[in-house]
Amino acid sequence: MYSKVLLAYDGSESGRRALLECADINNLLQAQIHLLAVAPIAATLFVAEGFVADVPQEEENERFAEVLREGLAQLKTRNVTAEGHLVTGDAVHEITRMARELAVDLIVIGHTHHTSRLERWWKGSVGASLVEEAPCSILVAVQHPS
């Protein structure tokens, strides 16, 4: 079965759903859980003197460090022990890199259905891209929009 699980967590509603589903299935699996938060690379603007970050990378990293702490705390309330990991970069690349590095058997992610084609196109899908790149099975916890 699955002995090591990587849970990609971003603090979103779909991420929380994935976190709770992972906690529930871990009661059956008793797997080693790794909670991963991926801080995106800060957006930049080009000005005459060079690139200037809209949001400093340190702020983005701290925001995702808080997301990670919150996720670990939620798991703990469900009696699930997890090791936390914070990385910066592209979500798909970092999730697959960590999955390989940790030699996990399962990746758990959240996904929200987008209501329009434009929204689907604009936001893309980490899940769809991850299917192509992942070195193991993926569990997608789906959150339907309200």
Image: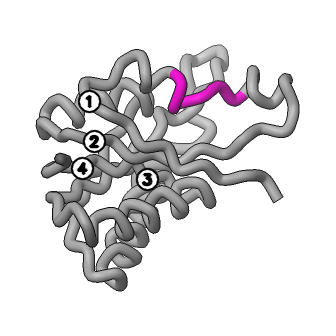
Direction from residue 27 to residue 92 in the image, left or right: right
Query: Residue, x 72% and y 41% (percent of image)?
Result: 113
- Dot 2 crowding, Cα within 10 Å, few <14, some 14–19, many 20+: many
Mark 4 belongs to which amino acid?
A: Val
Direction from residue 25 to residue 142 in the image, left or right: right
Mark 3 belongs to which amino acid?
A: Tyr
Assess whether mark 2 and mark 1 are in contact (beta carbons under 8 angstroms).
yes
Query: Residue, x 27% and y 42% (percent of image)?
Result: 106
Direction from residue 85 to residue 42 in the image, left or right: right
Assess whether mark 4 and mark 2 are in contact (beta carbons under 8 angstroms).
yes
Residue 126 highlighted magenta (yes or no): yes
Q: Earlier in the sequence, mark 2 or mark 4?
A: 4
The residue nearer to you, when weighing 80 against 45, is 80
Mark 2 belongs to which amino acid?
A: Leu
The answer to whether 80 is drawn above or below residue 92 in the figure is below
Q: Which mark is residue 5?
A: 4
Q: Mark 1 falls on what kind of element?
A: loop
Assess whether mark 3 and mark 1 are in contact (beta carbons under 8 angstroms).
no
Marks 1 and 3 sit apart, C-alpha to C-alpha, by: 17 Å
Marks 3 and 4 sit apart, C-alpha to C-alpha, by: 12 Å
Residue 88 highlighted magenta (yes or no): no
Residue labelled with disc 1: 136
Magenta part of the protein: which range?
123-128
Q: Quadrant of residue 87?
A: top left
Mark 1 belongs to which amino acid?
A: Cys
Q: Earlier in the sequence, mark 3 or mark 2?
A: 3
Q: Earlier in the sequence, mark 1 or mark 2?
A: 2
Residue labelled with disc 3: 9
Marks 4 and 1 sit apart, C-alpha to C-alpha, by: 10 Å
Which quadrant of the rendered structure holds the C terminus?
bottom right
